Image (spheres, grey):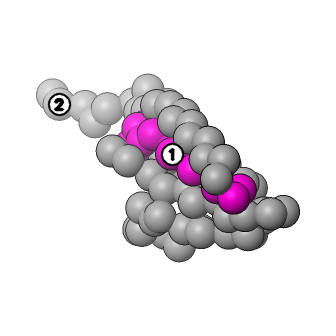
Amino acid sequence: MTSSPDPQLALTVDRAVHLTVVEERGADVRQLRVGPLGEGDARLLAALLLGRADVPAGEAGPWRGAVAGGSRTVGLEA
C-alpha cells in the first residue's frame, strides 16, 4: 500500500536572492547588499525602496527611481 505525502508537511520555499541598492546624490555614492532574502520579500522591499506598488515579476532589474538630489538603483542577484 502506497500513500501520498501529507500536504500539511509540504513546504514551499522562495528562491533566495540578494537585493542590491545603489544611491547616487551628486558625487556621493552609497551601496548596500541585503540578503539572502526570499524572492517575494526581496521584490516587496525593492518596490518599497523605489516608491512603487510592485516591480515586474520575472525580472531581476535593475530598476531606477528618483530620490531627492539623485537616483536610486535596485536589483536582485541570485
Total label count? 2
Measuring from the top left, give residue 46's x and y in whole percent: 63, 54
Q: Residue at x 51, y 36 (%)?
A: 33
The residue furthest front is 27
- Mark 1 secondary-structure assignment: strand
Measuring from the top left, give residue 10's x and y in whole percent: 41, 33
Q: Residue at x 53, y 73 (%)?
A: 56
Q: Foreground residue, 28 or 44?
A: 28
Which disc is residue 20 wearing?
Answer: 1
Q: Residue at x 47, y 64 (%)?
A: 62
Left or right: 20, with 55 as reference point? left
Q: Do we see residue 41 in this rendering?
A: no
Q: Do we see residue 35 in this rendering?
A: yes
Which disc is residue 29 wearing?
Answer: none
The residue furthest left is 1
Q: Which residues are magenta?
A: 13-26
Which disc is residue 2 wearing?
Answer: 2
Real-space Cα distance between discs 1 and 2?
A: 47 Å
Give the position of the C terminus as an image quadrant. top left
Measuring from the top left, give residue 2's x and y in whole percent: 17, 30
